[in-house]
Amino acid sequence: MLPGIHCPHYNEDNREADFLEMVKGMDTTGIAIENHCAIIYKDDQYKVISSREQAKAYKIQKINQRMIVTEIEKHAEYNEIVNM
């Protein structure tokens, strides 16, 4: 099991702001996925897939009291989770 919290449909309603506050308050890593996007986990690896080019996934962290949102890049091959 992966540590942290997850937010599907990140680009709907007010989820972006709400999820940022949730991650900030829990002091953990968050993974957010927009509509038409998914992350496949296989053993200790992952890859981001989407049915629409603009659909994205993000890693959200609190670093030095700032919220950092980083896009998780799409690759054809699996990548090591530790490099996420």
Image (cartoon, grey):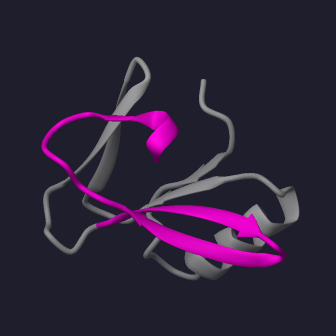
29 drawn magenta? no
Percent position (x, y) of residue 37? 28, 56
Tell whether position 65 is magenta: yes
Residue 60 in the image: above or below residue 66: above
Q: What segment is highlighted magenta in the picture? A: 56-84
Residue beneath the point at 38% across and 65% down = 34
Q: Nearer the viewer, residue 55 or 61?
A: 61
Quadrant of the rendered structure where residue 45 is? top left
Figure check: 12 above or below 49: below
Residue at the farthest top position: 43
Residue at 13% x, 44% y is 76
Determine whether, in the image, residue 22 is placed left or right of residue 38.
right
Which of these two is toward me, 52 or 78?
Answer: 78
Q: Residue at x 60, y 23 (%)?
A: 1
Number of marks drawn: 0
Which x, y percent locates residue 52? 14, 66
Q: Residue 4's x, y, as percent?
A: 68, 44
- Above or below, 36 against 65 in this view is above
Image coordinates of residue 84 in percent, x first then y, are: 46, 47
Q: Residue at x 62, y 55 (%)?
A: 30
